[in-house]
Image (cartoon, helix red, strand yellow):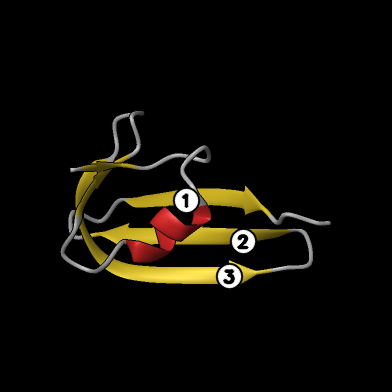
């Protein structure tokens, strides 16, 4: 089981694959069935669709140097 939240490094979020078991620590957990990554100028949005119908959304601010 992988605990996911906004404090997890982006590289770790990118390593999550379909069939991995994830948990957001707020009552949503399950097997990943769909991964959708959306990108804007300000952040990356990770949407993990779970096999039980739930969805976990993690928004990561982009590092701007």
User: Of the residues under marks 3 and 1, which one precedes in the sequence?
Assistant: 3
Estimate the spatial distance between the alpha carbons at disc 2 and disc 3, rounded to whole Å: 6 Å
Is residue 13 found left or right of 61 in the rendered image?
Answer: left
- Residue indicated by mark 3: 38
Dots 2, 3 in contact, CB < 8 A: yes
x 70%, y 56%: residue? 62
- Residue indicated by mark 1: 57
x 61%, y 61%: residue? 44
Tag 1: Cα neighbours inside 10 Å, few (<14), some, or many (≥20)? some
Q: Which mark is residue 44?
A: 2
Estimate the spatial distance between the alpha carbons at disc 3 and disc 1, rounded to whole Å: 11 Å
Residue 59 pos. (x, y %): 58, 50
User: Of the residues under marks 2 and 3, which one precedes in the sequence?
Assistant: 3
| Quadrant where the image shows the N terminus | top left
Dots 1, 2 in contact, CB < 8 A: no
- Which structural element holds mark 1? strand
Q: Which mark is residue 36?
A: none
Residue 45 pos. (x, y %): 57, 59
Estimate the spatial distance between the alpha carbons at disc 1 and disc 2, rounded to whole Å: 10 Å
- Which structural element holds mark 3? strand
């Amino acid at each position: 089981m992988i605990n996911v939240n906004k404090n997890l490094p982006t590289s770790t979020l990118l390593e999550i694959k379909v069939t991995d078991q994830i948990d957001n620590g707020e009552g949503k957990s399950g097997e990943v069935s769909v991964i959708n990554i959306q990108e804007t100028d300000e952040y990356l949005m990770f949407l993990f669709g779970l096999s039980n119908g739930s969805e976990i959304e993690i928004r990561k601010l982009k590092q701007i140097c």
